[in-house]
Amino acid sequence: MGWATDLHDASFRGVQFECTTVSDSWSKTIATHQAPYSNAASVEDMGNDPRRISIQAVYAGEDYLTWLNALLAALQENGPGELIHPIFGICYAQVTNHNVNHDVDNYDACSFSIDFVIAKSQKTKRFIPLKTQSFIQPTYIIANPAAALKQALEKLKLNDKNAFFNVVNKIRTGLQTVRNVMGIAKNAIENILSPETWATGLIDDITGLVTFDMSISAVSKWRDVIKRIQRFDKLFDTDDAQNEPVELKQLWRATQVASVVAISQSVVATVRNEMAQNQETSFTPVELAVIRQQNRQTLQQVINIEREQVSLGIDAVSQIQVYKEIADQIHLQIQELIEVHPPITTASIQVPCTLHWLAHFLYEDMERAHEIRRLNPDLVNPAVLQPGMEITVYAR
């Protein structure tokens, strides 16, 4: 996946424009110390200079002048503003210079260039609870697709009973396959004609598989269940799908997403409870960030699929909006948990030492060695830290 599939709509202070080229440059501040009559020099790295961005863009069309005047007004305001970089997304930048070019052959268009320097990002307030939902209900995700499938089944029953029974049997077989592979016992007879009921029941059963304790890594359990759910992406994609309602695949996509979201809600609830009891959390901030990224990828994939389904006559627009709202809430929930801790940083090992010595050096508390160990699961030998190693730690 390249940048062409993940472009952002470029804008500055809310005024959008079309980019043709973007150039980003980085440089370092270097102090050179040299003795007289010596060819050797000691070079000291004084840190990074702010990133510079050069954007070439165009406006075209009969209303181009309206957009150009709005952009010029935004560029002439004092102080840094919010820049949506087409590749890297949101950043805060100060305009250093800009120019506009008009060409006699293009009377309804103009090209312009803008140079920015990245300003200091706005500080995020810490230790202040965010306004997030305490729990995201899976039924909210599957409600619309379930209602659409129920209506489609009723219509199919009236028009083609053979196709109706084939679809019902396929749903029953598919659900049984999922339960067998996932190792879920069937506790009650499923009402196939009530899609919301069987979808909700399956989500609850899958969520019940995830229990976090210290005997096995919690993130390993989470990753195992997520991978098992992903195995059923093509459950209802078969060659004999001509008479099957497209609403069935839409509901199945929603059921998979709701299962992933429900498991993430279990993670959030577990960490919140451990923090409330002042216990060591089962998930580190780095692991929480991985879970957030997995949810973002899952939701983005299903949004892309839903956009392709608009031409098939199903209500994809409202379902896409549901997925967007869920993605935002999960992001805020996990960000809230991450920001309860001090920020994550790295420490460079200067002398050979152990984790206990490093914990004493950083925090004056060697008991926090296990905390550093959890933040560095790939560490081979915690008793031998060599100079030059980069260790992930909490900021002091």
Image (tube, rainbow, N blue to C red):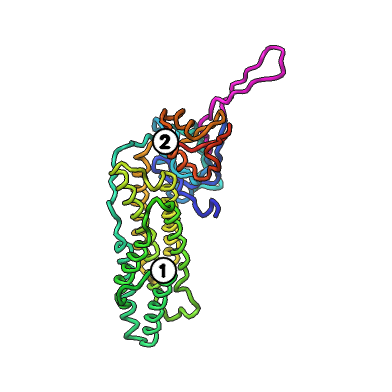
Q: Using the image as rendered, state which of residue 339 and residue 162 is in the foreground.
A: 339
Residue 39 falls inside the magenta stretch = yes
Give the mark nearer the N terminus: 2 vs 1.
1
Classify the position of the N terminus by image quarter. Answer: bottom right
Q: Is residue 354 above or below residue 11?
A: above
Q: Residue at x 48, y 38 (%)?
A: 392
Residue for badge 1: 183
The local crowd at label 2, few if under 14, some if 14 to 19, many if 20 or more residues have their Cα within 10 Å, is: some
Q: Using the image as rendered, state which of residue 125 and residue 278 is in the foreground.
A: 278
Q: Using the image as rendered, state which of residue 5 and residue 181 is in the foreground.
A: 181
Q: Residue at x 43, y 46 (%)?
A: 16
Residue 73 in the image, given as x and y percentages of width and height? 40, 37
Residue 280 in the image, given as x and y percentages of width and height? 36, 43
Q: Is residue 54 above or below residue 209?
A: above
Q: Is residue 38 left or right of residue 17?
A: right
Asked which secondary structure carries label 1, the reply is: loop
Residue 173 in the image, given as x and y percentages of width and height? 41, 78
Asked which secondary structure carries label 2, the reply is: helix
What span is in magenta?
28-54
The local crowd at label 1, few if under 14, some if 14 to 19, many if 20 or more residues have their Cα within 10 Å, is: few
* Residue 41 visible from this viewpoint: yes
Number of marks drawn: 2
> What is the quadrant of residue 15 in the picture?
top left
Q: Is residue 40 left or right of residue 142?
A: right
Residue 283 in the image, given as x and y percentages of width and height? 40, 47
* Residue 147 visible from this viewpoint: no
Q: Residue at x 39, y 77 (%)?
A: 171
Which amino acid does the dot numbered 1 rest on? Gly
Q: Is residue 46 above or below residue 191?
A: above
Which of the numbered marks, if any, corresponds to residue 368? 2
